[in-house]
Amino acid sequence: MSATTASGRVFKYGRDIDTDVIIPARYLNTAVHAELAEHCMEDLDASFASTVQPGDVIVALENFGCGSSREHAPIAIKASGVSCVIAASFARIFYRNAINIGLPILECPEAALAIESGDKVSVDFSTGIIVNDTKGSSYQAQTFPPFMQRLIDAGGLIEYTKRVLARNNAKDTER
Amino acid sequence: MGMTMTQKILAAHTGMETVAEGQLVEARLDLVLGNDITAPVAIDEFEKIGAAAVFDRSKIALVPDHFAPNKDIKAASQCKRMREFARAMNIEHYFEVGEMGIEHALIPEKGLVLPGDAVIGADSHTCTYGAVGAFSTGVGSTDMAAGMASGTAWFKVPGAIRVTLTGEPRGWVSGKDVVLHLIGAIGVDGALYRSLEFTGAGIASLSMDERFTIANMAIEAGAKNGIFPVDDTTKAWAASVSGRSYTSYQPDDDAIYGSEVVIDMSSLEPTVAAPNLPSNTRAISEATGVRIDQSVIGSCTNGRIEDLRVAASIMRGHKVAKGVRCIVFPATQMIYLQAVREGLVEIFVEAGAAVSTPTCGPCLGGHSGVLAEGEVAVATTNRNFTGRMGHVGSKVYLASPAVAAAAAIAGELVDPSAIAAAPPRERFRQPGTNVQRRTE
Ligand code: SF4
């Protein structure tokens, strides 16, 4: 999540979008990102994978990403080029997976309700400000708490863990 | 300020006196779990961390259950990747086909989770172990990778909903009906970011198997975890699966609960969740007559020995309706063996059901029972999302083993008491442990 801004065209979905429609289980026999991207949202919106452009934004209502813990879901979204997901709320495992792998997500019920498919939006992650360029309206999303910001700044959980382990090892050698 | 049971376990695993809702903590883990879908992704990530070894080779469990026995070549390579990692890292708890089971039935059966433990698993139904009074929650593969390397995970301390269970289920009503009713009442995001903490006099009437079923579906209400108090039933169970010592935690008297739900279990009817959400529940009397093409009995939700006993007691002496496929999949190898020894498998096969080796197969539309367009299934599993068990144009009704077995016989959803009268609930129980061990 190195870029602090994003902008693109919106794909708008409803509430309770579950991980089975984000990436159907029948495609989970692979972990290849590009293959997952080819089937992203397939059971809900068959044209998504062929029409999505790098930078595009998914906007959805409550409880986005509910269901299984498959990290393949945020991976498929990220690999399909989506720059950010804005939702009224996220299912908790999806939320932590997205942060851990570096898919930007923003919780903002007002924006999620008002923004429509095809709108062009711009997002600034550092301030949490979402601008609907098509409609000329703007919204304030919550920014991340400091601990999560540290994870994100480190480049995700893997980099963060690398640093923690290195620090612990250094301590061990001092002893 | 008082802490909930979940908060107490988290505090104990962070070395802090107290933790409070919303606080971000890093907790020590007692077990890190993965399966053939999530572990390969986690292993890739683990390698990026560059750790030479896992944090503790006795505190990691790897179970090939989703697409195993290998469904196709891709699945075979994923299982192989996990197997080779398990060997290279000398992982103690790797379970091969032939000794494995569906992870959430297998892990407790092997005594790998006990009261007071903190567990993460790269599978959403890791919340199942809340049944034994552990804090356990589903995470993604990256969390699993970091957990395997460091033995820790980050958590946002959850608030809680208190679920008070009173009365005793009657007739064919079981733990499955209780949890379906709960999800129907609070919705699929009713417990988002929170714990479901069960309490109340009614709990004493629930067997361990029923508690596993209820805790298993906590995630279906969006909960981070679901947790039961540790009582005599839990203690007897723990003693039967492990000699390891454990700590039982109790919520403080002044623990804070965001809301409370009270369920009088004696008032419940057999309950089903209609397509396409687990919260779309109704009493069986409002779903009677729905034609089904397939009945699926098993999974990590309801593939335990009591579930099979219930199903067999309804199917005994009956035939699966013409044109209906009934698939029974016991959750673990030990449960399967017990079902063979008790003659349950014979009842299923004579009735015309297909009995499968333990696998997740049909539950996630993976293999061994995938639905075609337009087909309708009743299943004892935990999810009925669009396309969950196959074609996007197929439908799933979630139900108890009693309802699924009755539907297999009738060819449509019916009240199980229309097929057979319910015996006393104790009939299905086995004190102490859910599986009798034979030593020969
Ligand atoms: S049986 Fe179904 S819900 Fe349980 S672990 Fe397997 S796929 Fe998941």
Image (spheres, rainbow, N blue to C red):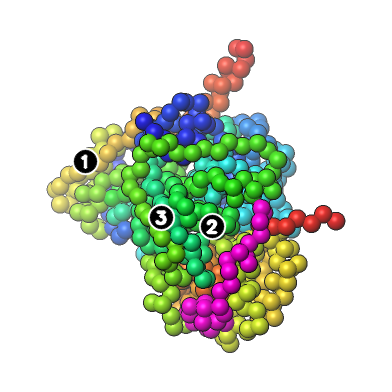
Q: Is A150 placed left or right of A107 in the picture?
A: right
Between A24 and B295, the one lying in front of the other is B295
The label on residue B371 is none
Out of A171 and B231, give the one closest to the viewer: B231
**Left or right: A20, with B146 as reference point:** left
Residue at figure coordinates x 65%, y 79% from the top left:
B316
Q: Judge if badges 2 and 1 mark residues of a common chain.
A: no
Q: Is residue B422 magenta?
A: yes
Q: Which residues are magenta?
A: B409-433
User: Which of the two residues, B417 or B361, is positioned nearer the viewer here?
Assistant: B417
Q: Measuring 72% from the left and 53% from the top, which residue is drawn there?
A: B96
Q: Is residue B371 above or below residue B47?
A: below
Disc 2 sits on a residue from what chain? B
Indicate the amino acid at tag 2.
Leu
Q: CA distance from mark 1 to mark 3?
A: 28 Å
Residue annotated with mark 2: B206
Q: Measured from the top left, where is residue B76 in percent x and y? A: 67, 57
Residue at the image position 51 percent from the left and 45 percent from the top: B229
Between the C-alphas of marks 2 and 1, the distance is 47 Å
Pointer 1 and pointer 3 on the same chain: no
Q: Earlier in the sequence, mark 2 or mark 3?
A: 2
Q: Magenta stretch: dominant SS?
A: loop
User: Amino acid under label 3?
Assistant: Ala
Q: Chain of mark 1?
A: A
State the image coordinates of residue A155 (x, y, percent, origin top left): 44, 33
The crowd level at tag 1 (other Cα within 10 Å; few <14, some 14-19, many 20+) is some
Q: Residue at x 21, y 41 (%)?
A: A140
Spatial CA distance of label 2 from label 3 is 20 Å
Residue B173 image offset from top left, x and y in percent: 50, 68
Q: Which residue is mark 3?
A: B221
Residue on which disc 1 sits? A140
